[in-house]
Image (spheres, grey):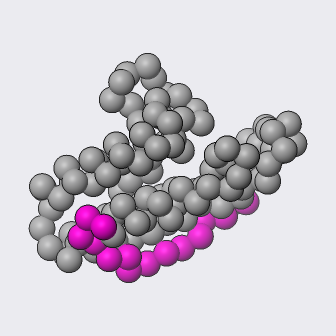
Amino acid sequence: MLHPPYTNIIKFSEDELDLSNYSVEDFLVKFSSVIQNINIFTDAESLICLVIGDVYYKSSWYRLSSKLADIIENNGYKCTFVAVKDFGETQNSKNEPLRTYRSLAWGTLLFKHEYVMMFEKL
């Protein structure tokens, strides 16, 4: 299961290997390297589960979920399942006031979901 950071929105460490320290462009390159490394250790029909949402980037909605799905598919997997996880009943819903404040302060929409995607290695 992969639940990568949403690029550099929240930095988890100062470690240069931490994906949360990269710009969107560099994050996509590094994520591709992660998938290539996974391929070394997986057989045909192995599964990858990706949990990810979308972000705002350069004042626009950026479909990070689609970009990561494309990377996985371009590395020999097919998408077999997609579900939308609503934050309404999850632990993250406790952060609703903070998320609403950030949305208003930054002039962005409030994301209330993530995607759960399953991929099978061909």
Above or below residue 44? Residue 60 is: above
User: Which quadrant of the rendered structure holds the N terminus?
Assistant: bottom left
Residue at (73, 46) in percent of width and height: 59
The image shows a total of numbered marks equal to 0
The stretch drawn in magenta includes residue 82 = yes
Instruction: Say left or right for 14 vs 9.
Output: left
Image coords of residue 89 (percent x, y):
70, 59
Q: In this rendering, does residue 79 appear at all?
A: yes
Q: Quadrant of residue 43?
A: bottom left
Residue at the limit of the structure toward the bottom, as seen here:
80
Identify the residue at image location x=12%, y=55%.
40
Which of these two is toward me, 44 or 72?
A: 72
Q: Compared with residue 59, is residue 79 higher up or lower down, i.e. above or below?
A: below
Q: Is residue 44 magenta?
A: no
Q: Nearer the viewer, residue 7 or 120?
A: 7
Instruction: Give the image location of residue 96, x and y in percent.
Output: 78, 46
* In the displayed structure image, the side of residue 71 where residue 12 appears, left or right: right
Looking at the rendering, in which quadrant would you find the C terminus?
bottom left
Q: Looking at the image, which residue is at 51% across and 43% down?
A: 24
Looking at this view, is 51 or 17 the one in front? Answer: 17
> Is 2 placed above or below 44 here?
above
Residue 49 sits in quarter: bottom left
**Whether residue 92 is visible:** no
**Magenta: main secondary structure:** strand
Give the percent coordinates (x, y) of residue 81: 43, 78
Q: Give the range drawn in magenta.
A: 74-88
Q: Residue at x 54, y 73 (%)?
A: 83
Q: Where is residue 18 in the image (x, y as percent from the top left)?
A: 39, 31
Which quadrant of the view contains residue 85? bottom right
